[in-house]
Amino acid sequence: MSVKKSVKLPRPRFDVSLFYLTRKFVDIIKTAPDGIVDLNEVSRVLGVRKRRVYDITNVLDGINLIQKRSKNHVQWMGDDLSHAGTEIPEEQKLRNDISDLSAMEEALDDLIKDCAHQLFKLTEERTNRKLAYVTYQDIHRIEEYHEQIVIAVKAPEETKLEVPPPKEDCIEIHIKSKKGPIDVYLCEVEQETAEKKSFECLSQTLKLEPEPIPIEDD
């Protein structure tokens, strides 16, 4: 069975990968007075949610390139900012950039390994298998999902999920299963009480067929 979902989402025209955003964040903080920035302002300038900015600061804090000054302010602790208003030899500038990039790459590699290890423990340990589910109320508690449409997928083991490079107006998700049906659930996360809410199953509505079916968001 194969399902193809196309959800139209407004997307900026620039790359929003963590690496790109980290480079932009470093450029901003290096030119800030005393190397101190307000994370709320950074979130606005980069055009991303604050939790995405936290992903960046966690990486940089882990390799001692920044230091938290208060709840929403961090300060640059990397190469000397006293050179900000003076000319730096191109060779030295490149060395500084390479050093910063190498440190960020190492930190990102460590984060990926840690996530992979945690995912393995969650999926392979027998005691965790009976808890491998999520309720509407669980999703409702995630503030970032409020007033958004969330699509949940329940699929058999060995189901393959592929996400092609996103287009400007939509994101496609390809899901393929050879061991059974794929259930797709619609979850409209509203701010009102969620106690009596539940997922709305889309599988019967969509009449899933062996061939991919596009789901367009109005």
Image (tube, helix red, strand yellow):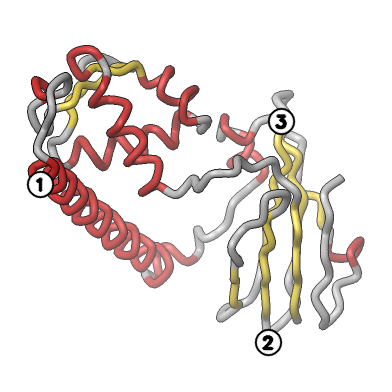
Circle 1 packing at 10 Å, graded few (<14), some (14-19), many (20+), is few
Residue of label 3:
147
Residue 40 rendering spot, x and y as whole percentages = 43, 18
**Closer to us: 42 or 122:** 42
Query: Which disc, if any, is residue 101?
Result: none
Quadrant containing the C terminus in the rendered view: top right
Query: Which disc, if any, is residue 91?
Result: 1
Q: CA distance from mark 3 to mark 2?
A: 34 Å
Give the residue type at disc 3.
Glu
Residue of label 2:
178
Residue 138 rendering spot, x and y as whole percentages = 58, 41
Give the residue type at disc 1.
Glu
Q: Secondary structure at mark 3?
A: loop
Q: Earlier in the sequence, mark 3 or mark 2?
A: 3
Q: CA distance from mark 1 to mark 3?
A: 50 Å
Residue 119 rendering spot, x and y as whole percentages = 38, 63
Q: CB atoms at circles 1 and 3 under 8 Å apart?
A: no
